Image (cartoon, helix red, strand yellow):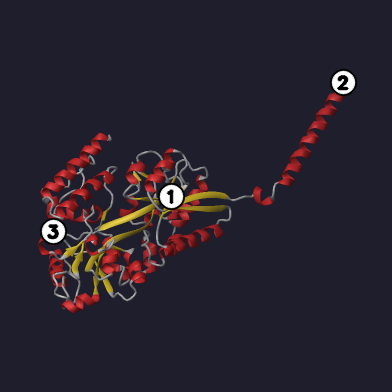
Amino acid sequence: MKKGLLNFLALALTIALILITYQSCLLIPESDIHAPVIIKLSGWGASPSEQALLKQVLQDFEETHPQIKIKYELISTQYMDVIKTRLIGEAAPDVFYLDAFEAPFLMSKNVLEPLETYITPEFDLTDFEDKLLDAFKYQDKIYGLPKDYSTLALFYNQKSFATAGLESSPTTWDELLAYSKQLTIDINQDQRTDQYGFGVLPNLARQAYKIKAFGGQLVDQQGYATFATEASLQGLQLVVDQYRQDRSSAQPSDVGTNSGSEMFGQGKVAMVIEGNWAIPYLSTTFPKLEFSTSEVPSINNQPGTMVFTAAYVMNKQAQHKAEAWELISYLTGKEGMQKWTSTGFALPTRKSVAATLGYNQDPLRAAFVAGIAYATPWQAGEHLPTIMSSFDNQFVSAILGDQSLEQAMVRAQESANQQIKANE
């Protein structure tokens, strides 16, 4: 009798639990039961038009992937500082932009998810430009897929060229120097230069290919700065001499502007070396400006330019890695990349997409596409931020004549290497 009562009570308790569970389920909205996975994506600031384009591409992704929602965050200032802080605090986004310039440091810190296990043959990894993909490889692993890129090219003012009787763009640096003298003018004869021939940006990101032109190197095999050699100085001396002796070049600050694109657009300089990003800026901000582009003039018979790229990477602590990969594979896949680069804000890193969009035949973008074959990637190991800071500070002083180029570069190299050793 007692055993039967116990069995009855156990059965009653089981039924009660089933009823409670059933009623709880009725209280949960169906939308919550099937709620999509939220993937957090972070990137840096860009023009309003570019942000609108990214928003559209993300909406297209969500339409074809209803089980995933993207929460995009724009980090407008101190981007890498914010990302590094959040990685330390395990609060970083699932997917985020990573510049090739900063990639070696993060790839070496075991905070990024290797992507090999996610990549299938159908993704067609061989379609990427090797030089761009290699920027996100570390110890035989792939940590990022390049989303777009830009090289540098020469922009020149068509009206200024016509006025000076110049029929074509310079193809060598000697020609560029000669053209710059012809294009530097004082319209009102008041000892004030109204137009300089060339606009110069003295930062290392624009000078590294000049260091290589005569056989110099930015860093050695151990990652220490080594740009103060005689070979490196030859390329940099061209910049100093043009500014100080020829007086045919100007920095943005000399003419009251903030960038190379702005001083070119305002007609303060007739030529400037800029990235692909300058095309939409100039077309929008200075719609009446007539300009053309050509490949960067060769130095010492060596073709040279820089290439800048960024990748989508996955946080190693991401909670939904399969869904994070779905986003990365879409944005860097053929369909997503074509949508992203179709307006010309950026150039596609996939060769098939570039061929489809025909940028190698575009009058303004063909020079940028051609440059990828011989460009110097803006990447040089974990310590490049330190090296860049030391270089930029001292190179400007050499241009202004506060010290000789050799003295400035020796100081910059020693300062950089001291900081690198102190942080090891």
Residue farthest along the top direction in this orientation: 2
Neighbor class of circle 2 (other Cα within 10 Å; few <14, some 14-19, many 20+) is few
Q: Which residue is mark 1?
A: 96
Question: Residue 373 location in percent, x, y?
Answer: 26, 59
Distance in Å between CA atoms under marks 3 and 1? 39 Å
Residue 41, compared with residue 356, is above or below; it is: above
Q: Which residue is mark 2?
A: 2
Left or right: 105, with 172 as reference point? right
Neighbor class of circle 1 (other Cα within 10 Å; few <14, some 14-19, many 20+) is many
- The three-letter code of the residue at mark 1 reads Phe
Of mark 3 and mark 2, the one earlier in the sequence is 2
**Element class at badge 2:** helix
User: Which numbered mark, 3 or 2, is in the foreground of this view?
Assistant: 3
Residue 300 shows in the view: no
Residue 355, compared with residue 331, is above or below; it is: below
Residue farthest along the front direction in this orientation: 190
Distance in Å between CA atoms under marks 2 and 1? 65 Å
Question: Residue 210 location in percent, x, y?
Answer: 18, 56
Q: Quadrant of residue 350?
A: bottom left
Q: Residue at x 28, y 75 (%)?
A: 290
Residue 400 shows in the view: yes
Distance in Å between CA atoms under marks 3 and 2? 103 Å
Q: Which residue is mark 3?
A: 238
**Element class at badge 1:** strand
Q: Residue at x 34, y 46 (%)?
A: 103
Left or right: 307, with 246 as reference point? right
Q: Residue at x 13, y 64 (%)?
A: 247
**Element class at badge 3:** helix
- Quadrant occupied by the C terminus: top left
User: Which numbered mark, 3 or 1, is in the foreground of this view?
Assistant: 3
Of mark 3 and mark 1, the one earlier in the sequence is 1
